[in-house]
Image: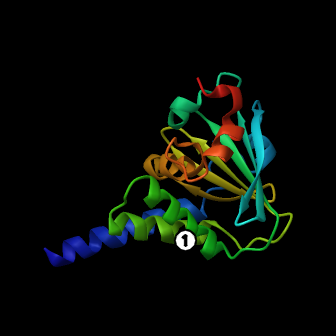
Amino acid sequence: MKHHALFARAATVLATTAALWWPAQASNVEPTANAALSGQQTVGSSLFRHWGFEVYQATLHAGAAFNAQRFEQQRFGLALQYRRAFKGSDIAQRSIDEMQAIAPLSPQQASEWLATMQRAFPDVKAGDELLGVHVPGSGARFYFNGQLRATVDDPAFSARFFGIWLSPGTSAPQLRTALIGASAR
């Protein structure tokens, strides 16, 4: 029985790794940020500051009928253009912390999602852009400076990750208001 559980855990890790590192070959995954945002419009944008320091310019792209109250059910892109350098591992840790602040994760889920984001998020410098695209029922796609970097085939992860900015429980309600603009129906 122990070997079966160990095998199942190894298979899960392998599947997650494969989903992250073989995304560009899938025919339904856009290879560039421009292609991923085709047909989307800017919903809102705002500069995010933390302790007075400029961190990133956040911009939400979505279809004309985007409804922020049902963000998990709609396709959209969230672009973060960084104003300073950060390590990818620090971005991943901060993301887990923000997800936990909205609603607790199990230790196993937090560990798995942290590892996923550590692989997906590169180190950034001022001017770099990370774009996350939420694909309902599928998961998330991440683009770095316009090029596909990773996919995460986990709808629960995607909804929780983008909830950092779009959930009513966000730690940055003013940023959320600026991003969702008139879509706050």
Q: Quadrant of residue 183?
A: top right
Who's the residue at 48% across and 50% down the image? 160
Q: Quadrant of residue 117?
A: bottom right
Give the residue type that dot 1 points to: Gln
Who's the residue at 44% across and 63% down the image? 15
Given the current orientation, which residue lies at the most extreme right position? 127
Q: Nearer the viewer, residue 83 or 8?
A: 83
Residue assigned mark 1: 93
The quadrant of the image that shows the N terminus is bottom left
Q: Quadrant of residue 177?
A: top right
Q: Is residue 4 above or below residue 140?
A: below
Q: Residues within 10 Å of mark 1 (few under 14, many from 20)?
A: some
Would residue 138 appear left or right of 12 to someone viewing this image?
right
Residue 164, given in percent of the width and then of the height, sits at 56, 52
Residue 141, given in percent of the width and then of the height, sits at 62, 51
Residue 16, given in percent of the width and then of the height, sits at 46, 63
Who's the residue at 71% across and 23% down the image? 64
The quadrant of the image that shows the C terminus is top right
Report the coloring of the rendering. rainbow
Given the current orientation, which residue lies at the most extreme front position? 52
Q: Nearer the viewer, residue 128 or 53?
A: 53
Q: Is residue 104 above or below residue 2?
A: above
Q: Is residue 7 visible?
A: yes
Is disc 1 placed on a helix, strand or loop? helix
Residue 85, given in percent of the width and then of the height, sits at 78, 74
How many discs appear?
Answer: 1
Who's the residue at 63% across and 69% down the image? 91
